[in-house]
Image (tube, helix red, strand yellow):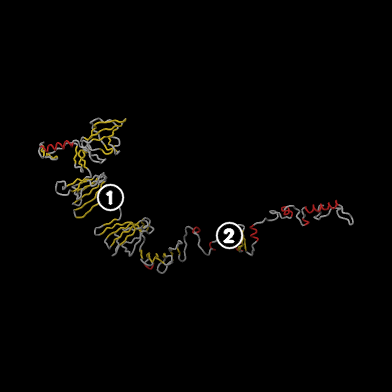
Amino acid sequence: MPRTGGVYSPPAGTKGVPNTTIQSVPYNTLIDDLTADANAPRPLTSGGTGATSASGARTALGLEIGTNVQAQDAGLQSIAGLTTTTNQMLYTTGTDAYATTALTPFARTILDDVDAAGVRATIGANDASTLITGTIADARLPATMSGKAFVGSVVVNNGSVTGYAVLSAGNTTNTGYIDFRKADGNRAGYIGYATNGGGNIDLNAEVGFRYNFSGALGPTYGGTPLVTTAGASFTGAVWAPNFLASNDFQIRSNGDRYLYFMNSAGNNRGVIVHNNAIGAMQTFLYNTSGTFVRSLTLREDGGGFWGGHMFEVGNNVGTAEFRFNANANRDHRLLSDASGSFYVQYSNNEWSTASTLVWWDAAANANLGGSIYTPTGFFTSGALGSNNGLVAGNGDNATYASHNLRISTWYGVGIYDSSSGNCRIVFDARGGHITNTGNHAVGGTMYVGSAAVFGDGNMQFSGGMLGYGAYLSDALSARATVYTGSNQDEVNLPVGHSVLSYSNGTRNRNQGYATYLSTAAYQFTLDVGASAQLGGTWRARGQITYSSGNSMVQMQRTA
């Protein structure tokens, strides 16, 4: 039967009676009722939850997660493990991990402030008079101040350890001064107004030099004040960003004297020195880092040295010159003019007049004002052999072995007609031949082998008629001269020699045509693939055409 108020009551008529047979129906009804009650949810009044599920049981018990109770949380679990004491607060040490730290009553007075102004009021930072230590940021200070009096010294320091300056109120010597101190606090020097010294400005180094300026500051140069020191003498070094002297400026010393030029970083850019030991004026040049580059030295003995690679004379004024005065009235000069010409000149009257020894025009053509004398000779340069030129001979004679003048050539010498640009005479130094395109005009006697040809036209042969016969034999043999050498680039072939030459056109017989070596090593050519031209006059003796536009022409040298 259903429970009443959570209390179970058996069904009516199910109890047994003593000495009476238990009937099956009431008994089974009781058993079924007990089974149904045992399987039904146990009501709260009976110690159950009245639910058939865990969530239903939590709801029945008022423990529904998220509604009646908090779900399991790692952060809460971490907090649950802490032990707190007075004036402590929680803070996180990681994800869902907590610890405690002190929270003083004063700190709590800051936490309840709603803005920065409230915090400054709480800690007393809203009034500069309450600041007792530290410094005020530059941004908090006024850009200008007037009527301010500082009691005691004022230190000017950029925070580095390289040193600092101190503005001092004064002492018995100076009414007020500026101290310059090193990083260790020791004074390096000062500037002061010395009332006890006549009211002058003193510039003092702690160890070293002292400068006294009496009088007002002079005018400025480039915005930098200049000090007027008429007739002043300085002992030691003098440093000045700008220096103006309307009269003499003297540097006196028995030793070396220096004039330095520095950049704003203190690096030397130039130094002018009188080197007393060697008697010289020297100029030393440095790069922007202060590293020495080169120097110019002018010695009292007349010597000079320049460590650069260029020395420029002139400034686009039309002419520029460089003079050499080795002796009175014995002068030379190098002169350059606006046309691009360059002259070497001589004068014996202090340049009232001048003689040009040699000059070059802008096209590099050399012009001589007199004769040329050379102990070795004149040589040409280039790839066409070596030792080509005009040189001195080896004796006072006129033989093959000894002579006064020698024309030296690797192979041959050609004499050209400048009006046409054609070579008319060729000297073959290797073979000893002279070839020309014209006639030989002989005013005296000409010897040809054993024959003598006289100016009147008569000829005499050594050996009489036998000699004449030998001459005719030699002459007839010479008419059929052919080249017997093996140089495939030979261009001076003998008269009478024939070559077979390629041509891409028609060549008329017995007509003269320029003949060339071919770029192909196995043939000659009249046009296509031409290389070096053959010397002399060549005439066509016949032509064979082996295909359209391609022929072979027999060419023979006739002169």
- Sequence order check: which comes first, mark 2 or mark 1? 2
Tell me where residue 263 appears, x and y as whole percent: 37, 57
Instruction: Please say if the residues under marks 2 and 1 sit with CB atoms less than 8 Å apart.
Output: no
Q: Is residue 425 left or right of residue 36?
A: left
Q: Is residue 242 left or right of residue 147?
A: left
Question: Which residue extends farthest front?
Answer: 466
Disc number lying in front (2 or 1) = 1
State the mark number for residue 489: none
Question: Which residue extends farthest right?
Answer: 19
Identify which residue, 324 or 365, lies in the foreground.
365
Separation of residues labelled 2 and 1 (CA atoms): 79 Å
- Amino acid at circle 2: Val
Task: Check the image and report above or below for 5 versus 510.
Answer: below
Q: Looking at the rendering, in which quadrant would you find the C terminus?
A: top left
Q: Is residue 126 left or right of residue 158?
A: right
Tell me where residue 404 appears, x and y as whole percent: 16, 48
Identify which residue, 344 or 237, lies in the foreground.
344
- Amino acid at circle 1: Gly
Which residue was labeled with disc 2? 119
Tell me where residue 144 appears, x and y as whole percent: 47, 58
Q: Is residue 22 left or right of residue 306?
A: right
Question: Tag 2, which secondary structure?
Answer: helix
Tell me where residue 305 appears, x and y as whole percent: 28, 57
Question: Tag 1, which secondary structure?
Answer: loop
* Disc 2 crowd, CA 10 A, few/some/many (<14, 14-19, 20+): some
Identify which residue, 509 or 257, lies in the foreground.
509
Quadrant position of residue 253: bottom left
Question: Which residue extends farthest bottom?
Answer: 172
Which residue was labeled with disc 1? 314
